[in-house]
Amino acid sequence: MNEISKKQQILQDLKKLVLSRVSIVYIVSDEEDRVETLLKELSATFQPRPKFFIWNPFQGLTGEEETIENSRDPFQALDQVIRRSDQAFYLFEGIHSFMKDDPLLGRKMKDVHRALRNRYSTLFIIAPVIIVPEELFRDMIIYELPMPDATEVERILDHVLRSSPQFPKMAESLTPELKERMIKAALGLSLDQVARAFRSALIGRSSLDPTIVDAIIEEKGQLIKKSGILKLITDRPSLDEIGGLENLKDWLRKRAGVLSQNGKSQRIPLPKGVLITGVSGCGKSLCAKAFASFWGIPLLHLDMARLYDGTAGEPEKALQIALQTAETVAPSVLWIDEIEAGISIQSQKAGGGTQSRVFASFLTWMQEKKAFVFIAATANVIELLPPEVLRKGRFDQIFFVTLPNPQERKSILSIHLKKNGVDPSRMNLNMLAKVTEGFNGAEIEQAVNGAMIEAFHEGRTLTEQDIVIAAGNIVPLSVTMKEEIGRMERWAYHRAIPASK
Ligand SMILES: Nc1ncnc2c1ncn2[C@@H]1O[C@H](COP(=O)(O)OP(=O)(O)OP(=O)(O)O)[C@@H](O)[C@H]1O
Ligand SMILES: [Mg+2]
């Protein structure tokens, strides 16, 4: 790898700041251990090596060889920093809570800035949020600490594995592909969280298999819970659970490797997202969910209805937090079901400015997002979507799903029979495909399930006849909504590509 690692990059960034005599560096991060280690390493790159002191409100200023007396109070500690003439790095942990309450502390910081700017001494502040008094903004640099990259995550994984009691056996069962997937699943977590995720995922295992990836993803659920309108969906159907829709599946299969090391080194462009529209019950939501299982990454559901009903606070703010969270746990799939509910033309008119503003900021984000957050959106009433959503370049593809053809009905029947523990080769699928003509996927599922209940009730195994009878009791949507479906198909003809072959 000729690309320098992220850690080296961070050290270089920080070194540049010190060399250009920035007196106060505000590091935005909640990873105190990691920052301590980084700064220790940073100090070792200087000749002579600056002393390194850490301050917190309980211990005061503590160095590697000395503890500075009477320095627990933040004002006293900063006075010490001003008074000392030796070259040093000072890392202040937890001072942001004092800055919030005491405006004089901002004033004191200004004195620190003036005292340090002519020495090679630097005051570092670490805090999870940015709390900076107005007057200090020009005197300090804010540095957002990037999340650990794959190399760092790999180092932790190796370490956690080696310290496991099952070590040699675990390592044997770890294929390179599985290792890559585990690392990918942990990206977006802080170093502490990565170590915790790996450790807790390994508990009770003596060897590794693909289910470990889900265990790691679960750990990310904690982060997601905090964001209000996002939910981590753990039930992610695989492509095998979708009957038909081969065009859409091919599209996805062609992109199997986009997240692999190989795909990255060849700079394969990352897909942005797809919009799936079409007839109800034909697998729109099912497909949206399958993207995540296909790539082995977390599936986040964005609740459009909650976004607007006010329970998550102001919509613009709530959306911003949700999108940031999705980026934090990237790579991820962001599933937005019935996107038109939030952003339709009519609701924009009715809701006045808020909805169009929320929507505009969503589109901007979609264009500018840096991390791999794949948007899987579904829409039922696509005519309601404003033209800017459908414009080329927003979504990679717009797919249209419609009623399954006979071949597809056969595979949907097989899938749902298998789910019920019935061997499909026992059934005359050609006949059943005829009987279910005009059915959507959901109705085929309903027929199979209904037949199962009937057979179970009578204490016998399922027969074709049960399915024929159950199907006869269902009035498919395609009958009641014939015109509606025709209209959708005409709309889609020029604007979307069929999900089925
Ligand atoms: N192609 C399919 N293969 C297998 N099962 C299917 C298929 N299409 C639909 N189903 C079954 O029907 C259920 C409902 O499908 P899904 O929720 O994906 O439909 P939808 O297009 O999102 O409908 P809606 O417009 O009502 O939201 C699925 O959970 C699945 O069990
Ligand atoms: Mg749906």
Image (tube, grey):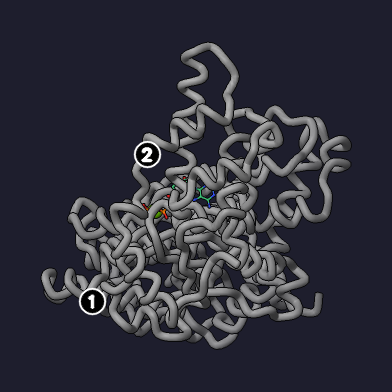
Q: Is residue 99 above or below residue 206?
A: below
Q: Nearer the viewer, residue 320 or 294?
A: 294
Residue lying at 61% horizontally and 58% vertically, measured from the top left: 187
The amino acid at mark 1 is Arg
Q: Nearer the viewer, residue 421 or 267?
A: 421
Seen from the viewer's position, the closer of residues 389 and 332 is 389
Tell me residue 404's x, y (percent): 51, 56
Tell me: 75 left or right of 459. left
Q: Quick one: quadrant of the C terminus?
A: bottom right
Tell me which residue sits at (57%, 80%) in the image.
Answer: 18
Q: Position of residue 258 (x, y in %)?
A: 68, 70
Three-letter amino acid code at the position of disc 2 = Ile
Tell me the SS state at disc 1.
helix
The percent coordinates of residue 315 (x first, y second) are: 23, 63
Q: CA distance from mark 2 to mark 1?
A: 43 Å
Between marks 2 and 1 in the image, the one whose residue lies nearer the viewer: 2
Q: Residue furthest top?
A: 459
Q: Provide the residue designation for mark 1.
A: 357
